[in-house]
Structure formats: structure tokens, C-alpha cells
């Protein structure tokens, strides 16, 4: 696999637009397109995601950067001006998820929409954006794995190689591995959201909890071969967080089907899923009379 040696895609007015930014932006736009399509299939308002997307995306970027800066605080304490320089990478998916989900929850509450019903639709498309965004790591020559001579190995320039691997030229393209796993996760989640019939007894939030489990497992596998991971104590930070995602997702999935059942997910085409659940609303009245 060749390496993109020039990280700048185009220059406009002397300002370089990097491939990293283009891949991230492309992932966001494709995810929004998929969310709108899935929402429409489920009888939900596709315009809602357009209203909230700018704020959710901005908060996700801020959260992604804050998490990265926190993990490399020794460096950024000495170079505070670099904390806002994201051109060379330094955005973490775990930080983005935490901030993005929280802000999306606030918007759902403000609009009177059921958060878990919408979260299932949104999270099903998120792995597609992650898969596309991972190619920004390829452009920046980061997030690669241990040395290998496999035909699909990626060539890393000497200045980007991790300490201890200076004499190696080709490495596992772990960003590619994660992109493929992300697409597999997205396929499963989108199929569940769109195709599964009501008799499966899926409950609102099940897709979100399942994403936490699947992505946690995938990330644990990827981290086992990465060479540039950040650490919390003796273990990679992603090990701690991914393990937490798996435990939290599994616990919530069990609770949702036992002592905390909640609503059964509406089947595709049921427009009640988008209607405000506030007392006195049309949707609330309809549910009360059925």
C-alpha cells in the first residue's frame, strides 16, 4: 500500500487544505446522508439531523481534541499553543463519542424527541463516518501497526516511525483494518435498524448499546498491534475505554431487557418515533389511547 507523501490536498489562497480534513469532512457528510435515509425509512423526520448536526459535530471535534490533549498533557502544558492545532491529527473517537452523544441528548430533550429512538438511528451510521475518517490517518502517516512485509503493508517515512521501529519501513495498516471493521459494524447496525421486524422485540437504545460492545471489541483487537497508542498507567488508553464500552454496553443491554425494559422500538414506517413525547402532544395522546 503506497503512502501519501504530501498531506496537503489543495491550496486555496495560500492556505493548504489537508487530506486529513477532507477525509474527516467526507465521513461526516456521508454519515449525515445515511442517517437521513435511515430516518426516512423509519418514518422519522430527516430534517432534524440537519438542524442539530453542526452543533453535534462541533462538540464532537472539541471533545475529541480535549481527550487527546488530556492524554498528552505533559507536552501541551509546555506547548499550549499547539492544543488547538488539529491539522496533524490528534482527534480521538472516544472523546468525540462522549461529547457528541451528550450534546445530541440535550437537543433531543429540548425538542421533546425520544433520545434513544434517535440515538439508534444516528449511531448506526457513525461507523461509516469513522471508516472514512480513518483514511485521514493514512494521509498523516499515523495510527499504523507493527512492522510487516505483507502485500498490503503501508510504507511509513522515517520521521513518522515510532521509537524502536526506526529501521523498519513497512507496517500493518491498522487504520485500514479498523475501517473494514467499522463498515462491518455499520452493516449490522443499519440492517437491524431498517430491516428487523417488530417481533424481535428490539427496544429503544439496543442499537446504541450494541455499538458500544461491537466497537469496543474491534478497538481492543486493533490496539493490540498499534505502535503509537497513548497510555493511561501501564495500559493503552484505548484498552481502558474500550473495556468500559463493552461492560457498559453489555450491562445496559441486559438491563434494558430485564429490570429496565423501556419502549419496544417502533418498526420502520411508524412516524410516532419522531413525534414529541411531551405531555399533551399528539404523539403522546395517540400512545395513551392505543
Image: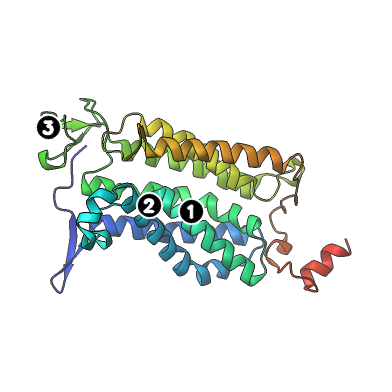
Q: Can you tell which mark lies on residue 166? A: 3
Q: At x 61% / y 37%, what residue is drawn?
A: 250
Q: Mark 1: give few (<14), some (14-19) or many (20+) Cα within 10 Å.
A: some
**Front position in the image: 143 or 247:** 247
Q: Earlier in the sequence, mark 2 or mark 3?
A: 2
Dot 2 lies on which element? helix
Q: Which residue is painted at 62% across and 49% down in the image?
A: 193
Query: Which quarter of the image is occupied by the N terminus?
Result: top left
Q: Which mark is residue 67?
A: 2
Give the foreground label among 2 and 3: 2
> Local crowd at mark 3 within 10 Å, few (<14), some, or many (≥20)?
few
**Which comes sooner in the sequence, label 1 or label 2?**
2
Q: Residue 225: percent from the left, percent from the top?
A: 32, 29
Mark 2 to mark 3: distance in Å?
28 Å
Residue 152 in picture, x, y percent from top left: 25, 32
Disc marking residue 98 = 1
Q: Quadrant of residue 210?
A: top right
* Res 72 label: none
Amino acid at each position: 500500500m503506497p503512502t501519501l507523501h504530501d498531506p496537503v490536498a489543495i491550496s486555496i489562497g495560500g492556505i493548504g487544505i489537508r487530506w486529513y480534513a477532507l477525509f474527516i469532512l467526507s465521513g461526516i457528510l456521508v454519515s449525515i446522508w445515511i442517517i437521513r435515509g435511515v430516518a426516512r425509512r423509519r418514518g422519522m423526520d430527516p430534517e432534524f439531523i440537519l438542524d442539530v448536526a453542526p452543533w453535534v459535530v462541533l462538540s464532537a471535534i472539541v471533545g475529541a481534541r480535549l481527550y487527546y490533549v488530556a492524554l498528552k498533557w505533559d507536552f501541551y502544558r509546555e506547548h499550549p499553543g499547539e492544543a488547538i492545532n488539529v491539522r496533524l491529527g490528534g482527534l480521538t473517537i472516544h472523546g468525540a463519542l462522549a461529547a457528541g452523544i451528550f450534546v445530541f441528548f440535550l437537543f433531543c430533550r429540548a425538542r421533546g424527541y425520544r433520545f434513544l429512538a434517535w440515538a439508534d438511528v444516528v449511531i448506526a451510521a457513525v461507523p461509516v463516518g469513522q471508516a472514512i475518517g480513518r483514511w485521514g490517518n493514512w494521509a498523516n502517516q499515523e495510527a499504523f501497526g507493527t512492522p510487516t512485509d505483507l502485500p498490503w503493508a503501508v510504507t511509513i517515512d522515517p520521521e513518522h516511525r515510532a521509537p524502536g521501529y526506526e529501521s523498519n519501513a513497512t507496517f500493518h495498516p491498522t487504520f485500514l483494518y479498523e475501517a473494514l471493521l467499522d463498515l462491518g459494524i455499520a452493516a449490522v447496525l443499519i440492517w437491524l435498524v431498517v430491516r428487523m421486524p417488530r417481533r424481535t422485540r428490539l427496544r429503544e437504545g439496543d442499537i446504541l448499546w450494541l455499538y458500544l460492545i461491537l466497537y469496543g471489541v474491534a478497538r481492543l483487537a486493533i490496539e493490540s498491534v498499534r505502535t503509537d497508542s497513548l497510555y493511561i498507567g501501564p495500559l493503552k488508553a484505548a484498552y481502558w475505554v474500550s473495556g468500559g464500552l463493552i461492560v457498559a454496553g453489555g450491562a445496559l443491554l441486559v438491563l434494558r431487557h430485564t429490570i429496565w425494559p423501556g419502549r419496544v422500538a417502533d418498526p420502520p414506517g411508524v412516524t410516532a418515533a419522531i413525534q414529541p413525547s411531551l405531555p399533551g402532544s399528539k404523539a403522546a395522546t395517540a400512545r395513551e389511547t392505543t
